[in-house]
Image (tube, helix red, strand yellow):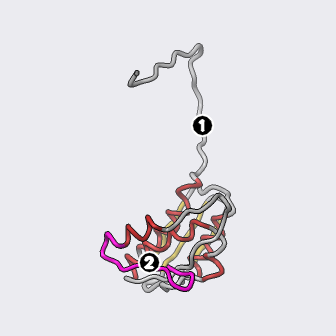
Amino acid sequence: MNDRFLVTGGARLSGEVSVGGAKNSVLKLMAAALLAEGTTVLTNSPDIADVPLMADVLRGLGATVEVDHDTVTIDVPAEPKYHADFDAVKQFRASVCVLGPLMARCHRAVVALPGGDAIGSRPLDMHQAGLRALGAHSSIEHGCV
């Protein structure tokens, strides 16, 4: 088996390519803004439905969030709330990404089990195992982690 691929093209390529924002990272970056007090600005954000949903989750935690085309500005207060809004969290799966930052920042978190797509069962075992590895106690009670 080869360790590399060699591609020989017929024509030299030149020019510029604009690469769109990564939909799989923007929601995690938005959640990560909870780790520090103050303003975080994300540019080149993709235009996906989950960005305004995550903005709603962060607003429920006390942050000020502005979404302007491909720029997301998040201002996190000195003491964010640690209990994520049930209705906002139930709308999409990535909302669980606020769990770790809330634990790191507030030393506690209450986040409803996420809702979202119907791809299939994706339990929160990895999230809970990560929290336990960092010394936190985690349980699922009344539909919340």
Residue 137 is covered by the magenta coloring: yes
Q: Residue at 41% x, 83% y: name it.
A: 108
Magenta part of the chain? 132-145
Identify the secondary structure beneath mark 2: helix
- The main secondary structure of the magenta stretch is loop
User: Is 74 above or below relative to 143?
Assistant: above
The circle drawn on residue 93 is none
Label 1 CA crowd tier, 10 Å (few <14, some 14–19, many 20+): few
Question: Which mark lies nearer to you, 1 or 2?
Answer: 2
Residue closer to the observer: 59 or 87? 87
Q: Residue at 41% x, 73% y: name it.
A: 35
Q: Position of residue 98 (x, y in %)?
A: 50, 72
As measured in the structure, the alpha-carbon distance from the residue carrying label 1 to the one carrying label 2 is 37 Å
The circle drawn on residue 17 is 1
Label 2 CA crowd tier, 10 Å (few <14, some 14–19, many 20+): many
Residue type beneath disc 1 = Val
User: Is 110 above or below relative to 100?
Assistant: below
Q: Is residue 27 shown left or right of residue 135?
A: right
Report the residue marked by disc 2: 102
Q: Position of residue 68 (x, y in %)?
A: 66, 65
Q: Position of residue 85 (x, y in %)?
A: 59, 83
Q: Position of residue 17 (x, y in %)?
A: 60, 37
Contact, mark 1 vs mark 2 (Cβ under 8 Å): no
Residue closer to the observer: 66 or 121? 121
Identify the secondary structure beneath mark 1: loop
Residue closer to the observer: 44 or 52? 52
Q: Residue at 52% x, 79% y: name it.
A: 111
State which quadrant residue 26 falls in: bottom right
Residue closer to the observer: 14 or 3? 3
Q: Residue at 68% x, 61% y: name it.
A: 118
The quarter in which the N terminus is drawn is top left
User: Is 3 above or below relative to 106?
Assistant: above
